[in-house]
Amino acid sequence: MVIKTDCEKVLGEAMPALKKALGALDTLDKGDIGEMKNYAKPPEDLVMVMDSVCVLLDKKTGWDEAKKLMNNPNEFIKML
């Protein structure tokens, strides 16, 4: 019962962040993806986010790989 209580507490703390992230994801559109993809030298935080996305999708990390994922913006948004 202690484990269940601990898990529920951690889940309760994580859920607001998940809901906020899902809300932000709903605002992405094809133009946003195109803008990100066209960076010759992207900001470090964008690279970090895209590396994280690559890890979650079981893809290689790195900006070149991230750009490949964004080649089809609509499909990329669906994957997210």
Image (tube, helix red, strand yellow):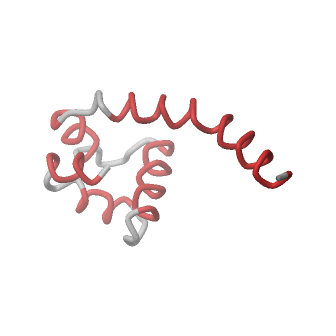
Residue 39 x/y as whole percent: 29, 44
- The residue at the point 48 percent across, 28 percent down is 20
Image quarter for residue 67? bottom left
Image position of 74 with respect to 57: above or below:
above
Camera-nearest residue between 35 and 3: 3
In this view, the residue in front, 54 or 35, is: 54
Quadrant in the picture for residue 5:
top right
Left or right: 39 with respect to 71?
A: right
* Picture residue at 80% right of the left edge, 47% below the top: 6
Whether residue 12 sits left or right of residue 45 in the image: it is right
Residue at the (71%, 43%) spot, across then down: 8
Q: How many numbered discs?
A: 0
Residue 16 place in picture, x, y as percent:
57, 29
In percent of width and height, residue 53 lies at 41, 55
> Is 55 situated above or below 79?
below
Q: Residue furthest right?
A: 2
Measured as percent of width and height from the top left, residue 65 is found at: 32, 65
Q: Is residue 75 left or right of residue 66?
A: left
Instruction: Name the residue located 27 percent from the left edge and 54 percent from the top edge.
Output: 79
Q: Is residue 48 left or right of residue 58?
A: right
Outermost residue, front side: 1
Q: Residue 28 versus residue 60: which sits nearer the camera?
A: 28
Relative height, residue 75 to residue 17 (above, below): below
